[in-house]
Amino acid sequence: MSVEPMQQATLPSTGGGDTAITGVSPRMRVRAETLSHAGRVRSNNEDHFLVATLAKSLYVQQTSLCKTDPLRFSREEGYLMVVADGMGGAVAGERASALAIESVETFVLESLKWFMHQRTGAEENSLIRELREGLSGADRAVTDAAEADRNLEGMGTTLTMVYAVGDEMAILHAGDSRAYLFRAGALEQLTRDHTVVQEMVEEGLISAEDARTHRKRHVITNVVGGPSRGVEAEVRTLKLRVGDRILLCSDGLNEPLRDFEIAAILQAEPEIGPACKRLIDAALDGGAPDNVTVIVARVDAA
């Protein structure tokens, strides 16, 4: 099987050497890699992704102390991973997913108090409010752009984001892209598909297997942008453990592949780079009717 050129990204490290994101806890570090492919059917890729390091720094302008390096980094670091699957036509879909990710990136950089780890009670509720505000900002960015250009009218995008510091992880989600946790050989879907067929499954009208081929399986009920303003942010927090793997993907992966097939690949391939490639290859072997993007991250002992 021949594989077309893929977009690829690896999380950078502020410390040099190993490609890694080191959390605030000295007991673990997180590494992540990404691949994206247009698929077998579409000529363009409307998916966009982001992997980024979050690091506090200090730049010494003047001091009486003897310093050889004026730039210093805090040991406290975090990481950010985002997948967005655009819709509304080739140009509009690509624009919507790019705008949403750019908006989230700016929000995390300028507004989110990401370095406040170990949040509990009121602080944890504050984090959830902040994340919801971040997704609302992305919704405004996409809808404002659509209203300013008739060629982009109605464009929208899914958005699934993971942000973590130390052993704490938060997920922000809208649409039918997904976040999974692979822990101790078991795969758990961390996000809910915001689709008509998912609602039908939950109401007992159809089975989960029927949903895979239902004619309305691509009808999304909650999206960033779209024909009207407003998005409902799904937010979830959890504790990471050494050995965990996190998978973010557009629906181009889970449409041709069932969860047990995804789990089998992750079980067979512990290395994150090869795991990304095997997931993409499996989606291509399954027909890849849509763009497919995967981010695989692993929590290691430091």
Image (tube, rainbow, N blue to C red):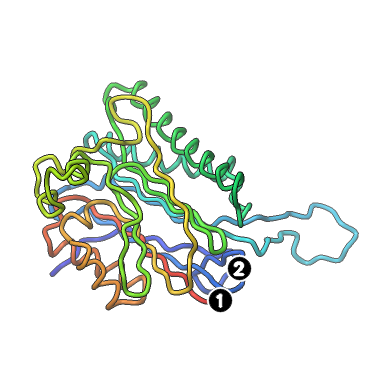
Q: How many numbered marks are there? A: 2
Q: Which mark is residue 302?
A: 1
Rendering coords of residue 46 (x, y %):
27, 44
- For the residues carrying marks 2 and 1, which lies nearer the camera in this image? 2
- Name which residue lies at 54% across and 64% down: 167
Q: Which numbered disc flags the more N-terminal residue, 2 or 1?
A: 2
Rendering coords of residue 199 (x, y %):
22, 41
In-image side of 242 versus 6 (left or right): right
Label 2, label 1: how many angstroms apart (C-alpha)?
Answer: 9 Å
Comparing 71 with 244, the one in front is: 244
Q: Are marks 2 and 1 in contact (CB under 8 Å)?
A: yes
Comparing 234 with 270, the one in front is: 234
Rendering coords of residue 26 (x, y %):
61, 72
Which quadrant of the rendered structure holds the N terminus? bottom left
For the residue labelled by badge 1, is the local secondary structure a helix, a strand or a loop?
loop
Could you say which quadrant of the image residue 117 lies in? bottom right
For the residue labelled by badge 2, is the local secondary structure a helix, a strand or a loop?
loop
The amino acid marked with disc number 1 is Ala
Comparing 138 with 117, the one in front is: 117
- Classify 85 as above or below 150: below
Rendering coords of residue 104 (x, y %):
47, 42
- Name which residue lies at 55% across and 74% down: 17
- Classify 273 as above or below 116: below
Residue corresponding to mark 2: 25
